[in-house]
Amino acid sequence: MMGFSFLYCFVSLTVAYFTCSIILVHFYVYWFFLFYLTVAYFTCSIIQPLCHNNERFALLQFNQSLTIYGLGAVAGFSKVASWRLEEDCCSWKGVTCNNHTNCITRLDLNSARLSSHINSTGTLFHLVHLEWLNLANNELHNFKITAIINNISRLKDLNLSFCGFSGQISSELLDLSNIEFIDLSDNNIVTHSFQFRNLGLEILVEILTNLKVLNLKTVYIASSIPHSLANLSSFTYLSLHDCGLQGAFPTQIFQLPNLSFLRLRLNVNLTGSIPEFEWSNSLTALDISRCNFSGTIPSLIGNLTKLVSLDLSFNNFLGELPLSIRNLASLKELDVTNCNLSGLIPSLLDNLTQLSDLFMGKNQLTG
Ligand SMILES: *[C@@H]1O[C@H](CO)[C@@H](O)[C@H](O)[C@H]1NC(C)=O
Ligand SMILES: *[C@@H]1O[C@H](CO)[C@@H](O)[C@H](O)[C@H]1NC(C)=O
Ligand SMILES: *[C@@H]1O[C@H](CO)[C@@H](O)[C@H](O)[C@H]1NC(C)=O
Ligand SMILES: *[C@@H]1O[C@H](CO)[C@@H](O)[C@H](O)[C@H]1NC(C)=O
Ligand SMILES: *[C@@H]1O[C@H](CO)[C@@H](O)[C@H](O)[C@H]1NC(C)=O
Ligand SMILES: *[C@@H]1O[C@H](CO)[C@@H](O)[C@H](O)[C@H]1NC(C)=O
Ligand SMILES: *[C@@H]1O[C@H](CO)[C@@H](O)[C@H](O)[C@H]1NC(C)=O
Ligand SMILES: *[C@@H]1O[C@H](CO)[C@@H](O)[C@H](O)[C@H]1NC(C)=O
Ligand SMILES: *[C@@H]1O[C@H](CO)[C@@H](O)[C@H](O)[C@H]1NC(C)=O
Ligand SMILES: *[C@@H]1O[C@H](CO)[C@@H](O)[C@H](O)[C@H]1NC(C)=O
Ligand SMILES: *[C@@H]1O[C@H](CO)[C@@H](O)[C@H](O)[C@H]1NC(C)=O
Ligand SMILES: *[C@@H]1O[C@H](CO)[C@@H](O)[C@H](O)[C@H]1NC(C)=O
């Protein structure tokens, strides 16, 4: 519709102007006006009071490929149900525009009860100015992720968690060169049909060097973790929970200076050990449960004084739980179930005053 009316307007203008121009011999005005119109239509460089037509059109087109399910439409639970054609699209729920350019920079349609009814492989968005996109918690299983991430190279934050995606994550992800936050977790949890096998982690960390947060929970990767991941010094959050990882875990990752959350849970073929060299002291949560870690638990673990949650359960360690665990004054959760630990149970409760969950079963601990 928009394209058509633009064309119509354009043709009428052309005819009107052409007639005028023949009389007034003002061809150059026509060309200037045409140029202005074209620029205004296709870019966001001209300041306007309202949201840009092309972006509004892109949103409506995207909306047309969706249906609202359940109570979303009836009770107005869905943000898109409140979108009104007569209103400025910058004021639509979930849409945020830049104050100066009025280009759409944020789109937050998380939990909007949206369901895709079109099998789309083309580009859904032409929102090239987007920096923040959250479509988490919707049923977008008919979309290919390519259709969503195409041509939004300014994107910094992408959240497509719980969207029901499947298939291989394609190389368009690597075009998001400014990306800092990626959450692709919990798509097809049971079948592991959302996969990262073709592309792999190595190329990802080689190209997307601004990454701070990466959550690939239940994305099937089925390879080893590249050593180069330890080069991404701005990492704060890394979850590779249940990714079918293999090989040896690169211990240098424990030294990432700002890493505060590390979860490797449920990768039974991932081997590793807890390093004895100096760690970064920024970790607040460490979960390596149900992997294949071995070796001793070094006493140095007591230096991770910011730890709030420590889960080492279902691994095959050797020896004792070091007494230095008592230094972890912020610890709320400690799980060392089924760790093949032996020796005396250290008295922890005097020291760990914050501790609320403690699991030590299935070991050879005495005392
Ligand atoms: C967006 O899509 C929903 C569901 O198809 C529809 O009810 C609503 O009217 C659409 N909004 C606009 C502004 O087109
Ligand atoms: C844009 O608007 C937001 C909210 O209205 C405000 O917090 C922010 O400071 C504004 N930014 C600029 C650059 O004016
Ligand atoms: C979408 O694709 C799936 C499998 O690729 C197919 O089963 C389904 O019928 C398609 N739906 C539509 C509306 O074309
Ligand atoms: C993406 O952008 C490139 C260059 O700007 C363009 O050539 C290409 O056609 C665009 N792709 C889509 C699907 O819009
Ligand atoms: C992604 O969105 C979900 C649902 O809103 C939220 O729970 C999760 O924390 C978000 N992830 C990131 C990295 O912000
Ligand atoms: C880490 O980066 C340095 C320099 O940027 C490079 O020489 C080195 O090979 C990288 N390490 C890995 C494991 O990629
Ligand atoms: C680590 O975090 C601090 C404080 O937030 C920040 O100043 C510093 O630049 C970060 N380091 C890296 C390598 O990102
Ligand atoms: C672990 O490795 C074995 C042997 O290579 C393989 O059969 C099994 O499927 C792997 N398990 C997972 C969860 O990747
Ligand atoms: C666990 O690691 C040990 C060596 O540390 C290896 O012998 C064993 O096969 C591994 N188990 C699995 C399931 O990968
Ligand atoms: C661990 O902490 C102890 C006491 O706080 C300190 O003396 C030691 O240097 C630390 N070791 C490392 C490797 O950080
Ligand atoms: C389990 O602990 C026992 C006794 O400490 C030790 O002999 C054995 O090697 C340990 N198993 C593994 C897989 O480390
Ligand atoms: C732990 O508690 C014991 C007994 O109350 C005390 O002697 C010891 O200094 C405490 N250790 C730490 C690291 O707080």
Image (cartoon, rainbow, N blue to C red):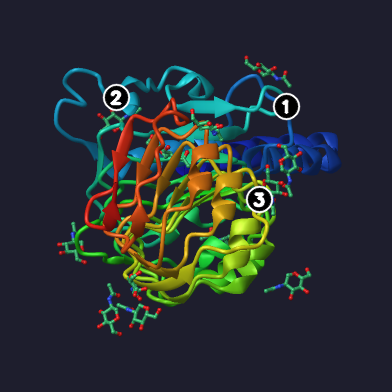
Q: Residues within 10 Å of mark 3 (few under 14, many from 20)?
A: some
Give the residue displayed 58% in from the left and 39% down from the top.
Answer: 305
Give the residue displayed 44% in from the left and 61% down from the top.
Answer: 146
Between discs 1 and 3, the one toward the N terminus: 1
Q: Residues within 10 Å of mark 1 (few under 14, many from 20)?
A: some
Between discs 3 and 2, the one toward the N terminus: 2
Q: What separation in Å lies between label 1 and label 2 (alpha carbons)?
A: 28 Å
Q: What separation in Å lies between label 1 and label 3 (alpha carbons)?
A: 47 Å
Between discs 1 and 2, the one toward the N terminus: 1
* Distance from mark 2 CB to nearest ligand 1 atom below 8 Å: yes
Q: Regarding mark 2 in the picture, which secondary structure is present there? A: helix
The residue furthest front is: 367
**Circle nearer the viewer, 1 or 2:** 2
Lateral position of residue 183 relative to residue 194, left or right:
right
Depth check, front residue: 100 or 174: 174
Find residue 330 and report its horizontal and vertical position in percent.
51, 31
Depth check, front residue: 133 or 264: 264
| Residue assigned mark 2 | 81
Image quarter of residue 64: top left
- Looking at numbered disc 1 in the image, what kind of residue is underneath it? Ile
Find residue 17 and report its horizontal and vertical position in percent.
70, 36
Lateral position of residue 165 relative to residue 90, left or right:
left
Lateral position of residue 100 relative to residue 131, left or right:
right
| Residue assigned mark 1 | 47
Residue 149 drawn above or below residue 135 = below
- Looking at numbered disc 3 in the image, what kind of residue is underneath it? Ser
Give the residue displayed 54% in from the left and 26% down from the top.
Answer: 96
Q: Quadrant of the N terminus?
A: top left
| Residue assigned mark 3 | 280
Find residue 12 and report its horizontal and vertical position in percent.
58, 37
